[in-house]
Image (cartoon, helix red, strand yellow):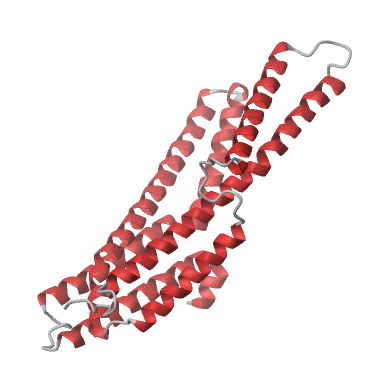
Amino acid sequence: MTDPVNPLSGVTTTDLLIEHRREIADLTQRIKNRRLQVCGLYGTPIALVLTLLMWAGSKIFIWLNSDTPSAINNIFGGVAFILGAATVAQMMAEFSDATPWKDSETPVRELRLELSLAEERHVLEARRRTPPPMDRQASYKERIPGEIARLRKESRHYRRVHLTMQWMLFISSAAISAVTAWYDPPQPAKGALIGLGFTVTVVTAASGYFKPRERAFNLQQTADNIEQHTTALELGIAPYSATDEMQNLELFATTVEGMRAEQRMREQQLDQPQQGQQQVI
């Protein structure tokens, strides 16, 4: 099915919506860049002043009656030179006519206002040119493979985190016993024992709090279920064996959204304390 066309300009609805999304993405990136520019513009001179004060303070309070070591002077002098050069470069980039910065002398609030207006234009344009339900459901179906890939990527990430934590526990626990048995008394290895015991405690607490194994299992299960329904829709088998394609797409979108909502609910339950999980369950 072809996209509706604007009779005045001949531009399709898809092209217009894509252009709005590009404008929103561009403004979002410009806001991030401008925030970094402002932080550097004001933060670098402050860091320079603090460095000079620390340099002077170390001379006054530590080496008042003697010469400051050359290493200390070299460190403070090098840091001050770098910060001074960065300050001058940023000032030139901000206030010079031939500035390399795209949004120099532009407040962040003005860019955020432009972003809000662009998002409002996108919403109004999308509402005015909303395609029929069957087209939206077909488009939703085409986005499902990306959602499955995202779920599996996150599942692999949490699985790797879980395996890393388990191996750290195995190695640290075994090393504690080995070091304790090797040194008697364990005075030469007291630092190693403290570090290994600290590692075991931290990893155990982090594993119990963040629950990477459960998160990986839930994500993988949701991805497999969505893929199963996607395959059933493509093959036209139950529960998507109706002769009306629009009915199949509607059922598919409803089922997948239910699975995604259930996945989000499971993630919220994992983020809650144990007592809160029992109340929710």
- Horizontal placement of 144 versus 238: left or right? right
Towards the viewer: 167 or 104? 104
Could you tell me residue 46's position as x and y percent?
72, 38
- Horizontal placement of 84 versus 238: left or right? right
Where on the picture, by quarter, is residue 58?
top right
- Horizontal placement of 277 versus 79: left or right? left
Towards the viewer: 232 or 246? 246
Tell me the residue at 56%/45% (across/down). Answer: 201
Residue farthest to the right, as pictured:
65
Above or below: residue 152 compared with residue 59 = below
Above or below: residue 174 compared with residue 76 = below
- Horizontal placement of 70 versus 231: left or right? right
Where on the picture, by quarter, is residue 266?
bottom left
Above or below: residue 103 compared with residue 85 = below
Count of marks placed on residues: 0
Could you tell me residue 111's position as x and y percent?
55, 60
- Say if residue 43 shows up in the picture: yes
Could you tell me residue 276's position as x and y percent?
56, 72
Above or below: residue 176 compared with residue 134 = above
Quadrant showing the N terminus: bottom left
Tell me the residue at 25%/74% (across/down). Answer: 10
- Say if residue 273 shows up in the picture: no
Towards the viewer: 222 or 147? 147
Tell me the residue at 52%/53% (across/down). Answer: 32
Could you tell me residue 13's position as x and y percent?
29, 75
Tell me the residue at 48%/65% (across/down). Answer: 270
Towards the viewer: 144 or 239? 144
